[in-house]
Image (tube, coloured by chain):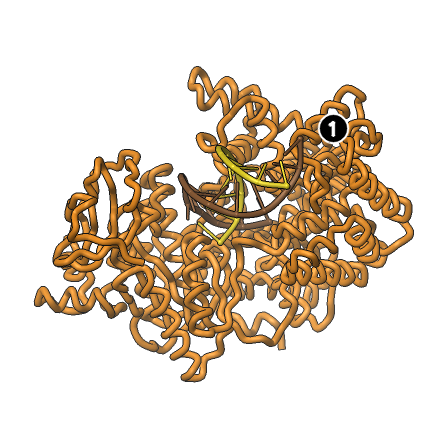
Chain colours: A orange, B brown, C yellow
Amino acid sequence: MSFVDQLNEKQRAAATCVDAHVRIIAGAGSGKTRVVTTRIAYLIKELGILPDRIMAITFTNKAANEMKQRMEEMLEESVGIQISTIHSLCVRMLREDIAVLDYPRSFTILDSDDQKAILKRAYKEYGVDAKTYSYGSVIGYISANKTAFVSVEKAKDLAGSFQSEQIKAQLYAYYEKELAQMKALDFDDLLLFVYRILEKYPLIREKWQNRYDYIHVDEFQDVDRLQWGIIRHLVSDQCKLCVVGDPDQTIYTWRGADIDIIMRFDHDFPDCKTIVLNENYRSTPSILNGANAVIANNRNRIEKELFTRAKDQGKIVHFSAMDDANEPVWIAAKVRALHASGARYRDIAVLYRSNYLSRSLEKAMLDAQIPYRIYGGMRFYDRAEIKDALSYLRLCLDHAAIDLAVRRVINVPKRGVGDRSLEALEAYALTHGVNLYEAVKADAVVKGKARAALGQFVEAVEAARAKVHDVAISILLQELLLDSGYLHALEEANEQERIENIKELIADIEHYEEENPDGTLDDYMQMISLYTDKEETESNQDFIQLMSIHAAKGLEFDYVFVYSLSEGVFPNERSVADGGAAALEEERRLAYVAFTRAKKKLFISDAQGYSFVLDRLKKTSRFVAEIDPDCIEHVGLAKQETKRDGQEAGSANAYIKANTWQNTQMESNSPAKRKAQLRKGDKVQHQAFGEGIIVRVDDGLATIAFAHKFGIRKIRIDHPSIKKIG
DNA sequence: GGCGGACCCGTTTTT
DNA sequence: CGGGTCCGCC
């Protein structure tokens, strides 16, 4: 029996088309990963292609690992296919060839904390206010410029006479200068440097072209121009490219993803074959048709209706809660009910637009004693203690970027080295032309108690440096954390969780050492920089999974909850304000991705009441109304509303009409003047109107949002009829 | 000069 | 809720 026998006709065509470039337009749940893995197995087992001639590029580390695992299962052996993200592919290439750009093989890879630290110094130097220019937006600005090949000079030109643009361009210049000086690369540089090398050095380009005969690119709809440039350079005349993607699932245009790349693939490769997979094997008809109706509202789209032959298992359930607090409680109750009726927790996921939404969910899960795991948000390698520990390790490598590590841990644990001492050290380093660590070591600046503490710090680092090549990384780290007093300080503060995390890191390093007996500290540090989250240690524990929709891309679950479908939250207001109609369509694609993750049953929810984030009353997301009315049932407040108005229950339009009272637009908000006792956001009790929330306070007059019947009222803040409640 | 506590603000998505 | 800032204490 052949691998390909298990595929449907179109899938089989896609998997066995190996003599031309192939574009596979694969709808949600149409088995695209299966097609790619089968294709690779077919190449190896039936055509006798050597595994190391095959490469697969995935979007995330998680997807790469999953594909590797599936390949192993299919081939019943572990083979040498290169399966990696484009970023790790680039690191591999740079370790071989970065020397031509006059950079060391052991270049430092910056994470977002490092980027922020650099910007912080730039802000200080130029007197830029971090509130007016958030780090995030400036990092985004720099990244957008870099990936679009906009140099510092060009950015300055483009800025023209706009002061805010000029400032951002100035920060960009500082940032790039700083990186060059440290011989450090950020995530964008990893790709940019590779692109530059492939572009400029034909011999190196040919070397890499000669390595691969079959290149596969997954999630091709989210590829950006720079990535596409690199991939094209890797495709030689005898190499066949196979790309898989779904334009309806493009959710990364904010990061440069360009839908035209998949749309115009046949222009770049006129002899390519295009195969459309539109049979869905994942979801029930209600879920699929409901989602189809939503995505059909996008105008900039190629029509592609997915169908399924699966049996239906009930409509999509929409719950509209009375208020913020009720929504996650309802989800928790539903999860418990599903579990009671036999579902495993691990087959249940809660998805949301923004990571901050996980907080309220987390609380509800804790209260309901439901085991859960949150993906994204604060990731393992983002934790302060992990960064500290890795910074101590970085001190052992005498890199040009060592200053970043010194700044991070010179006063962790507290050694009495504050801003002033650090400034003095920086000045010393500058005048003596040495790095910060050398300045500390020189022992000529800091006096008094801090001096002794720094002495101990230097001693610990020197001891580690002396044996960096002789001792395992895990041992080195343990000694460093002990000698520097870091671990001791955590114990003193009774930081059990942080200590546990450090232990986990050490275990993680030991694991790395087992897998890579020849791995150096350098290798480890570069590898770790590409991982934003720790590999899930296989566990048979049963927990529900909480994650952003972006993080859920490519995954599927029996039961899916999509949380907080309120206008402004999802579709995200800021996103739409920035990007207009195109951004709204991307939000809709996100909704489509979220809904199509569900196999058996989809639950979506929103809440009424006042939103602190949006500063106005909440309103159900338009995406709820866009779901095919035949595929959805409304429960909770929404249902009551429709009944009260004597309208047909279950009709999305009737439902929306019944809720138009919520459309009440708030006056635009000027900075609220604060009165001593009552403030915006406080809950109050009114004699007649019941509970309300203060929306706005102006000159002693409070605008208060009360429950439905009463709505918005203006009341003197010192009026005896209202009192604050907890 | 360093440090801890009090208080403020503002929350997009990721390799 | 976390991160930043301001302030008063050591």
Q: Amino acid at mark 1?
A: Leu
Q: Locate residue A469 relative to residue A304 in the image: left or right.
A: right
Q: Secondary structure at mark 1?
A: helix
Write the residue at 61% across / 36% down: A117
- State left or right for residue A515 relative to residue A567: right
Q: Residue at x 63, y 61 (%)?
A: A497
Which residue is situated farthest in the left direction here? A646
Location of residue A640 (image quadrant): bottom left
**Quadrant including the N terminus of chain A:** bottom right
Examine the rendered structure and indicate whether residue A617 appears above or below residue A579.
below
- Is residue A663 shown left or right of residue A42? left
* Other residues around mark 1 within 10 Å, as few (<14) / some (14–19) / many (≥20): many
Residue at the spot of label 1: A425
Name the residue furthest bottom.
A341
Q: Chain of mark 1?
A: A
Comparing A51 with A567, the one in front is: A567
Q: Foreground: A405 or A2?
A: A405
Between A551 and A377, which is closer to the camera in this rendering?
A377
Q: Residue at x 41, y 60 (%)?
A: A360
Q: Is residue A242 visible?
A: no
Residue A521 visible in the displayed image: yes
User: Residue A109: where, in percent of width, then height?
Assistant: 69, 41
Taking the spot 16% from the left edge, 51% from the top edge, the residue there is A720
* Image: A605 above or below A247: below
Q: Where is residue A429 shown, x and y percent of the image?
A: 77, 25
Q: Residue furthest top?
A: A161
Residue A354 higher or lower than A70, as above or below: above
Return the x and y of residue A338 as percentages of the image width and height: 40, 78
Split into 4 quadrants, where in the image is the C terminus of chain A? Answer: bottom left
